[in-house]
Image: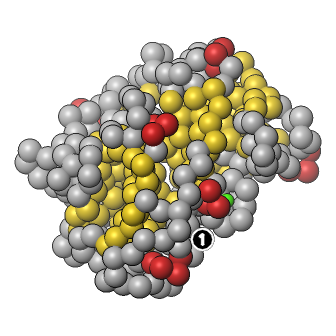
Amino acid sequence: MPALGHMRAVGGGAGGFACSRVAWGLLGLALTATGCEASHLIGSAGFVRTRFVEPQLVGWANPQLQLGDLDGDGVAELWLLDPRRGELCLRLAEAAAGALRCQTLDPSVGPSRLCLAQLTSAGQPQVLVAGQAFLSIVGWPADQPLTVAQRYPLTLPAAHVERSRGWRAGGESATDVVWTATATQPIATAWLWPGAAAATAATAPVPIDFALSAAATALLPVSPGRDGGRELFVATLAGVEHYSSRGTHSLLPCAERLEGSPRLALLDLDGDDDDDLVALAADGTLQAVERRASPPGWGCLDEAPLAEPGRSLLWLAAADFDGDGKRDLLAATAERSEGLLLWRRGLPTLRYPLSAPARAVSVADGDGDGDPDVAVVLSDGSLEFFHNSFAPR
Ligand SMILES: [Ca+2]
Ligand SMILES: [Ca+2]
Ligand SMILES: [Ca+2]
Ligand SMILES: [Ca+2]
């Protein structure tokens, strides 16, 4: 993938669902706030849970959920996609009382994947949906239906889509890059949007295909990555590939354990200030790969966080939840009694049971106070928000 030889860029954004921000400070009190069906403290300190019943979501078999601040007001919106029917729903912070704004996308979009990407060159807030035949940009003007504003043909159906900001590739600069990959062939595509100076509202992205060792199962772009550069991790049916903006490319060790991983996360497991890789394996276990500084490379780790016998995980993500400057690991388990698990190095694991099995999870700053919060869609059609109440920053 020569196009990744010279990547350079700028930072990312933060991620709305404020039920009542003031109320979250009343630690220890059970409370009901305007717009919430119910809210209460559960489990250990760290997250305060609020639950909303969403009849519209009942029966969604495989919802996708993304939190992200696309309109730049500092508070994340919540997006939901039923990938089979192409129904896309938006919930704004101000609509915490329960108004999901839903729209069925053009059927030609087909089974699809949701990607929260506010492209730098676009003036209006929009969201990306990658489907069978198109990469679509969906606009959401105030009080108007969600509409497909632009779409670009795909040569292969997209099973995965992720976005990163400000890469430079193959001598061309791009303010935004959207990564897509198909589930059936060893090919991924970097969609480069031209630099801001050259961009207009109608600017089309330049797609660049690159070869993988096998079909992709997950994409994890990292910016900034190590040494201020950019990195891309691609989980495939043959293990996890690592690309760096320094021009290096390698297949990580213990590939057989990482085959077909549906989810990757990057955090420092051993405290050497160098981020290591955690992969959710296809069998629901966690696997860890350590990054080594000298000589530079990777090594298998026999023990991964949260990897207990008999435990099966569905999802994971890394973020600094407790504000100590180091990323922590959040995982969703298949068992509602275990629910969400939060791992922080050197500290006891925190558990947050769920009222029903989780279907989808997402992390972003939902209340605009600067720390990451968590949203979960449950199998009974309810939404649960976990507001971060670790130490204030
Ligand atoms: Ca927002
Ligand atoms: Ca490390
Ligand atoms: Ca932390
Ligand atoms: Ca927050």
Viewer-proximal residue, 309 or 22? 22
| Relative image position of residue 307 (x, y in whole percent) | 17, 52
The quarter of the rendered structure image containing the N terminus is top right
Q: Residue at x 58, y 17 (%)?
A: 110
Quick check: is the Cβ at mark 1 less than 8 Å away from ligand 4? Answer: yes
Is residue 14 placed above or below 216 in the rendered structure? below
Viewer-proximal residue, 127 or 222? 127
Position of residue 100 in the picture relative to residue 296 (left or right): right
* Residue 17 visible in the displayed image: yes
| Relative image position of residue 391 (x, y in whole percent) | 41, 84
Q: Secondary structure at mark 1?
A: loop
Q: Residue at x 71, y 65 (%)?
A: 73
Indicate the amino acid at tag 1: Gly
Position of residue 284 in the picture relative to residue 23 (left or right): left
| Relative image position of residue 189 (x, y in whole percent) | 61, 28
* Residue 158 visible in the displayed image: no
Query: What's the image's color scheme?
Result: secondary structure
Numbered disc total: 1
Viewer-proximal residue, 357 or 118? 357
> Which residue has dot 1 on it?
368
| Relative image position of residue 265 (x, y in whole percent) | 39, 52
Q: Residue at x 53, y 73 (%)?
A: 20
Q: Residues within 10 Å of mark 1 (few under 14, many from 20)?
A: many
